[in-house]
Image (cartoon, rainbow, N blue to C red):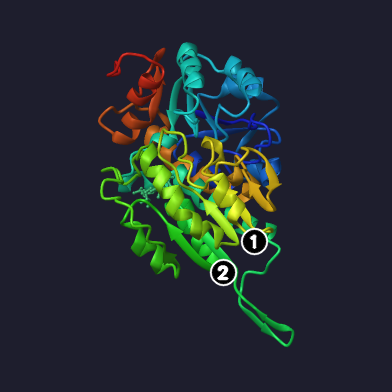
Amino acid sequence: MIVGVPSESSPNERRVALVPSVVSGLGKAQLEVLVQRGAGDAAGFPDAEYERQGARLAADPAQLFGSAGIALCVGGLSRGPEADLAQFELLRAGQILVGLLHPLSAAWAIQRLAQKGVTSFALELLPRITRAQPMDALTSMATVAGYKAAVLAAEMLQKMYPLIMTAAGTITPARVFVIGAGVAGLQAIATSRRMGALVQAYDVRPAVKEQVESLGAKFVELGLDTAAAETAGGYARALGDEFYRRQKEVMAQAVADSDAVITTALVPGKKAPVLVSKEAVERMRPGSVIVDLAADTGGNCELTRPGETYTVHGVTIAGHRNLPSTVSYHASQMVARNLAAFLQNLAPDGEVKLNREDPVILETVVTHEGEVINPRIREALGLPVPHPW
Ligand code: NAD
C-alpha cells in the first residue's frame, strides 16, 4: 500500500502530514511512503531526509494522487475552497484520505468526498479512549496552539512577564487570564507561568479547577451554576444565551484587570461562545492584548476579526486561524506520529481493514462507497440519520 504525502493546499499552511522519522516505521508495517517534492520544506524537512529514510518522491500532485492508495492531509479541506477543489479533482473512487478534515465546519467538503467515492477518515472524530491517544492529532495541535498563544501574547505585550527587582525599580509580573482550560488552555497556562506571569483561569467544567491550580495558576470563581456543563465525553456542553450573557458580565472585571487574555473556549461542533464583550475590551488598559484561539470558529471575543491582528481602544486582538502552522516543525512531528499510529491500526500488515468493531475506525470514518457515514455530519447536511453503515 502506498501512502501519499501531498504538499498542503490551504493558503499559509506550513505543516506536512508525515516527517522523515516516521517513514521507516511505516515501511516495516508494509506501508510505502511517497512524498510530493518540497512537501516538507516549509516545516524544515527537506526531500533528501525523506529519501534517506526510504521514502520515494513524486514530482507533482497528479503523480502523487495517481499512485497513492492512502492520501494524508493535515491542513484540512476547508480553508481555501479553490485550492481544495483542485485536490478534489485528483482524488478518485476507492482512494482513502486520512487527516484533519474539519468535518463539522466543512460538511460541504465531506459531501464532495462522498460524491467522489473516497473513503475518508477525520482524526477530529477519534473517540477519546486510551487506545486512541497516540493518534489524537486534535490534542497535539491544541498543545502547540496553547504554547504559541502564550508566546504570542508575551511578544505583543509592551511589558515583561516576570517579577524583576533592579536598581531601577521593581517590575511587577504581567497578569494573564486564560479562558477555557482544556488542552490548549492548560498549555497556555503552563507556558505563561514558565515565563513568570501571574496567571488566572476559568472554565465551565468544574473538574478543571484542580488542574489549573496544579499549574500554579488561580481559578477564578464566577459563582455560576456549571453543574451540567460537562458532557459524558468530558467536553463542554453548549449552555445557552442567558448563561453566556451572565458569564460575560461577571468575567468582565477579570478581563479588565489582565494584561493579556488568552481565550480557548470551544464547544465541539458549535460556534465558539462569545465570552469577552466589547465593553470588557474597552475596560482593559491600553497596551493590553487578547489572543483568541477560537477565532477559527467565530472567536470568544466580540471584537475578534478571524485571521487578523489589529488594535482597538488601545487593545491588540490577535485572531490567528491556524497557530499550529506557525510552529510547523514540531506540529508536523506530532501530527505525523498521530497519523502513523492511525495508519498502523487501519492497515496492519499493509492491507486496509475496515473493521467495524473497532471504535477508532467506526467513529472516524466520514465517507465510504459514495455515502456520508458519520451521523453528526449527516445531520449537518440534512441527511437521514442513522447512517447506512
Ligand atoms: P475543547 O477544545 O472542546 O474546549 C476547550 C475548553 O473550553 C474546554 O476545557 C471547555 O470546557 C472550555 N469551555 C467551553 N465553553 C466554555 C465557557 N463558556 N467558558 C469557559 N470555558 C469554556 O476541549 P479540549 O481541550 O479538547 O478538552 C476537553 C477535555 O477532554 C479535557 O478534559 C481534556 O483533558 C480531555 N481530553 C481527553 C483526551 C483523551 O484521550 N482521553 C484527549 C484530549 C483531551
Q: Which label's residue is closer to the chain start, 2 or 1? A: 1
Question: In the rendered structure, are the residues bearing label 2 and label 1 in contact, judged by CB atoms less than 8 Å apart?
Answer: yes
Disc 2 from disc 1: Cα separation: 9 Å
Quick one: SS at disc 2? loop
- The x, y position of residue 373, in whole percent, is 35, 20
- The x, y position of residue 284, in whole percent, is 60, 57
In the displayed structure, would residue 311 be above or below residue 288?
above
Quick one: SS at disc 1? helix
Say the numbered circle drawn on residue 154: 1
Q: Which residue is mark 2?
A: 197
Q: Residue furthest bottom?
A: 167
Among the 4 quarters of the image, the one containing residue 166: bottom right
Residue at (45%, 50%) from the top-left corner? 249
**How dense is the environment of label 2, judged by Cα within 10 Å: few (below 14), some, or many (20 and up)?**
many
Residue at (70%, 83%) from the top-left corner? 169
Q: Amino acid at mark 1?
A: Ala
Q: Is residue 302 visible?
A: yes
**How dense is the environment of label 1, judged by Cα within 10 Å: few (below 14), some, or many (20 and up)?**
many
Q: Amino acid at mark 2?
A: Ala
